[in-house]
Image (cartoon, grey):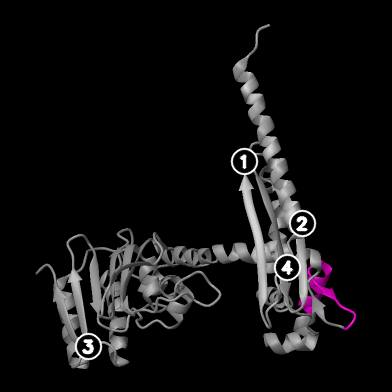
Amino acid sequence: MNRDALQEIDKLAARMSELENLVRRCLEERSAKTIPAPEPASGRTSVDLVVSATDTSESGEGTVYYSGHYEGKGRVFHWMPQERQMDDLLRLNTDKASKVLSALGHKQRLDILRAVVNEPLSGAALVERLNMGTTGQLYHHLKALLGADLLVQEPGGGYTLPAHRMLPLLLLLAALSDLIDTSDYMDMTEVRSNAGAYLGREQGGYDTHILLWAVLENSVLEHRAGYCSKVHIFVHDDYTVTVEDNGRGIPVRPLPSSNLSNVQSVLTDIAESSGNAPFVSPGAEKGIGIAVVNALSESLSVEIKREGKVHRQDYKQGIPQTELLTVGLTEATGTSVTFRPNRELFGAGFERKRIVERVSELAAAYPGLAVTVHGPAQ
């Protein structure tokens, strides 16, 4: 009898894969049933979620497995391991999905859901905690969330999340924490599309020096605060320029409740940058902060000397290309920003003569600040 060895090996591999999946699921279910929840610490909330993906579904697209438990304020929720086929997720009804995301995307509704995760809250407590001002405004949102089965009202009158909605919401918040920086990148794209609002309305290319003045203004503000005495401006041959000062250095520690460093927030948060912009171009509607400079640059690198270390991060079109890296040790402090303006928006490069004129103006206004220009003599 003729036997196809390769075909038999393929069948055996498929059966082994099925057995492997079966064993994995049994272990997950046993773990979920037998592992006790950790002892609660006073005033603390713990979240333990496990999400994994494999490519072992029959369709070949993959399968997402997730499970976990939540514990907080005396309440504990456990979820048995669950799975979703990737092809089902990719065929999700986008009309309905967008409605859910739109409902949750309303800031006040999301604030309500976050507020009641740990404990039931009455309407009055929500109004006070969220500074809503009126109960009428609150109950408008409560009605929508109750109708969507995203809230329930307990017998005592407090509002809380239904148990079966807790894990999906926590998973969504976990995903959002990884995606939240995309909102900054969208803002940066809008800046490039509406550059005139920041640079003023001009015919032809915009003036590259506007960006340089904006970066230089940050060093001037450090000087006015009493932390910066020297600034060096390096004009390079490749359409780039560097501004280096001996100020305190941009803070590098992570922001609260975020994976982002303070540096990345400063360099990508357009709203914060524009709202406190140190420089406004003549004829512009909005101010130019360092995040706007980043958005309008082909590339930007920042190097920070602070707390005994040298940190560096690189950007292209405002999007970080690396994490904030520690690249050296130093006893000095300061910030160095090197950027190349977007050549589709800007005209000629930097002119040493104009920079020297600007430096002379700064010397007259701030005698204690030494600004030195280095680079081509033209």
Q: Secondary structure at mark 3?
A: loop
- Using the rendered view, name the quadrant where residue 8 is placed: top right
- Contact? badges 1 and 4 (CB < 8 Å): no
Front in this rendered view, residue 77 or 291: 77
Using the image, determine if residue 310 lies above or below residue 21: below
Count how many numbered circles sit on residues in the image.
4
Give me the residue at 82% from left, 71% from top: 146
Q: Residue at x 79, y 85 (%)?
A: 123
- Residue 298, placed above or below residue 256: above
Amino acid at dot 3: Ser
Q: Is residue 337 left or right of residue 262?
A: left
Residue at image x 37%, y 75%?
A: 290
Front tag of 4 and 3:
4
Determine the CA span between mark 4 and mark 2.
14 Å
Amino acid type, residue under disc 2 in the picture:
Met
Q: Which residue is mark 3?
A: 229
Q: Residue beneath label 2, please?
A: 80
Badge 1 density bin: few <14, some 14–19, many ≥20, Cα 10 Å: few
Q: Which residue is mark 4?
A: 37
Q: Is residue 59 visible?
A: no
Q: Position of residue 189 (x, y in %)?
A: 45, 63
Task: Check disc 4 and give the amino acid type.
Answer: Ala
